[in-house]
Image: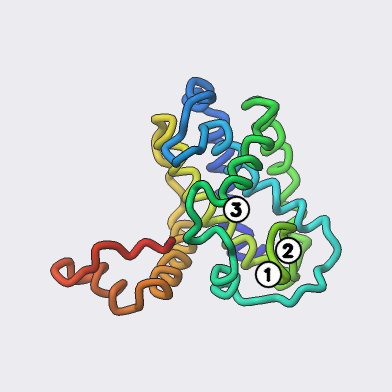
Amino acid sequence: MTGAQEDFLAAARSAARLLSGPELTAAWGRPSALPEFGVAALAGHLAYQVLCVRAALAEPAPVQPCVPLLEHYRRVAWIGAAPDEDINVRIRQGGAETASRGQAALVRQVEALLGELPGILTAEDGERPVRLPFWGPWSLTLDDLLTTRVMELAVHSDDLAVSIGAAAPDLPPGTMERVIGLLARLAARRHGPVNVLRALSRAERAPRTIAAF
């Protein structure tokens, strides 16, 4: 099993624990900490980050060219999009649909898949091209796809925890290193490496933000 596969499973198991907690039960119908995103829809979006991996692996090998990880983020439509733009509306609607049968059904779906995924992933080559249907005309290697999902799971687990008053999930150090490494590369691309260097080492010269997105 590759490092990306191990980190994905760690992040997915952590998300499953958050999804099954009583804090989510109590907050299910409330707004989340994200603009226009209800707690239930955010929970569905978090769960989707696990569920979509099996869907991607079930598809035939994509014919679309495989691009590097940062090129993928250069092409995606959601970076920089306003909350009311079509891509973000569709993301919220997709989360709501995934969660539409309620918390218990959502947890059962995620936990059932987590019982299968270790065996599924162990049998797969991390360099295998895969693709999600809402992307444009490109694909990623499986390990790069899993890296994108680890980041999504970490970020949206924190979003959900803040929204429902739960403790932020404590991911393993190696898993967080993968997330922080990706976000740092995206931040350097957006703001320039010198600004990231200064933000991390020289507060007196740091820019106001080095947010990756």
Going from the N terminus, do you reach mark 1 or mark 3 first? 3
Residue name at image x 86 percent, y 63 percent: 60
Distance from label 2 to label 1 (Cα)?
A: 6 Å
Check disc 2 and give the amino acid type: Arg
Residue name at image x 63 percent, y 35 percent: 96
Q: Residues within 10 Å of mark 1 (few under 14, many from 20)?
A: many
Q: Is the C terminus in the top left, top right, bottom left or bottom right quadrant? A: bottom left
* Label drawn at residue 131: 2
**Residue 125 drawn at (x, y percent):** 74, 69
Cβ atoms under marks 3 and 2 closer than 8 Å:
no
**Residue 44 drawn at (x, y percent):** 61, 38
Residue name at image x 56 percent, y 49 percent: 88
Q: Which residue is mark 1?
A: 140
Element at badge 3? Answer: helix
Check disc 3 and give the amino acid type: Ile
Q: Which residue is mark 3?
A: 87
Q: In terms of image quadrants, where is residue 1?
A: bottom right
Rendered view: 1 above or below 159 = below
The residue nearer to you, when weighing 149 against 169, is 149
**Residue 150 drawn at (x, y percent):** 55, 56
Check disc 1 and give the amino acid type: Leu
Q: Residues within 10 Å of mark 3 (few under 14, many from 20)?
A: some
